[in-house]
């Protein structure tokens, strides 16, 4: 009887010891989540940063700035967290949630306007953004940007730090603006594919107007 009691007591102590040994491990796992991890989750779920839309100046830089994308943009990635904290992207007087007004030059000429619209994301977290803008004149431009966000470890001034990187994965002509996709354009996102459908109205070989339906697909 005494031996049986001692065996039961030792078994209970062993179970209690195993349960206690798991508690610090679980606490350690929750503590390993960094601020960058939290921001990354927010961006991939809502495409916002600290509850606010991404600064349109940042998106503007990824279009090439002057809307000339034929040779490809110069900036294809940037540290998103550092960008919104920097003077480069600060402009309270000209900044809206999704748009920016560039003001006028010294002669009073309009320097243009830029805005973007978030369309959604693919199942593998490629974010689709429609942009539009002008340089102050009568013409306007539009581009579709395909963006991704990632956490990256790097060394800054000799210290190891985490970065929140916004990457330009690709771009395409947008559905609005002059001389681009024409009329009745639609953009659809399904799984890992983005489809842009539109119509063109151009004269055929006999000079008669001909409506052509075109569909472009982008797989990621």
Image (spheres, grey):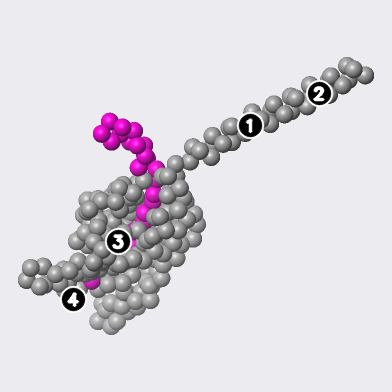
Residue at the spot x=31%, y=72% of the render?
176
As drawn, the label of residue 9 is: 2
Residue indicated by mark 1: 22
Secondary structure of residue under mark 3: helix
Q: Earlier in the sequence, mark 2 or mark 3?
A: 2
Q: Where 105 sits versus 170, above or below? A: below
Residue 95 in picture, x, y percent from top left: 27, 65
Give the camera-side residue of 92 and 142: 92
Q: Earlier in the sequence, mark 1 or mark 4?
A: 1
Secondary structure of residue under mark 2: helix
Question: Is residue 215 visible to us here?
Answer: no
Q: CA distance from mark 1 to mark 2?
A: 21 Å
Q: Nearer the viewer, mark 1 or mark 2?
A: 2
Give the camera-side residue of 48 and 177: 48
- Looking at the image, residue 54 sits to the left or right of residue 203; the answer is right
Q: Main secondary structure of the magenta part?
A: strand
Residue indicated by mark 4: 138
């Amino acid at each position: 009887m005494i031996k049986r009691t001692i065996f039961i007591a030792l078994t209970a102590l062993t179970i209690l010891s195993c349960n206690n040994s798991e508690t610090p491990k679980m606490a350690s796992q929750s503590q390993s989540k960094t601020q960058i991890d939290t921001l990354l989750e927010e961006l991939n779920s809502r495409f916002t940063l600290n509850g606010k839309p991404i600064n349109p100046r940042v998106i503007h830089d990824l279009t090439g700035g002057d809307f000339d994308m034929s040779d490809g943009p110069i900036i294809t990635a940037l540290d998103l967290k550092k960008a919104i904290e920097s003077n480069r992207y600060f402009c309270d007087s000209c900044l809206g949630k999704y748009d920016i007004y560039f003001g006028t030059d010294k002669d009073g000429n309009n320097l243009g306007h830029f805005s973007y619209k978030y369309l959604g994301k693919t199942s593998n977290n490629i974010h689709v953004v429609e942009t539009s803008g002008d340089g102050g004149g009568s013409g306007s431009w539009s581009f579709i940007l395909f963006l991704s966000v990632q956490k990256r470890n790097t060394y800054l001034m000799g210290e190891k730090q985490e970065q929140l990187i916004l990457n330009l994965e690709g771009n395409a002509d947008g559905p609005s603006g002059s001389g681009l996709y024409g009329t009745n354009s639609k953009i659809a996102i399904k799984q890992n594919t983005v489809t842009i459908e539109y119509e063109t109205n151009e004269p055929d070989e006999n000079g008669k107007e001909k409506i052509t339906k075109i569909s472009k697909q982008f797989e990621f």
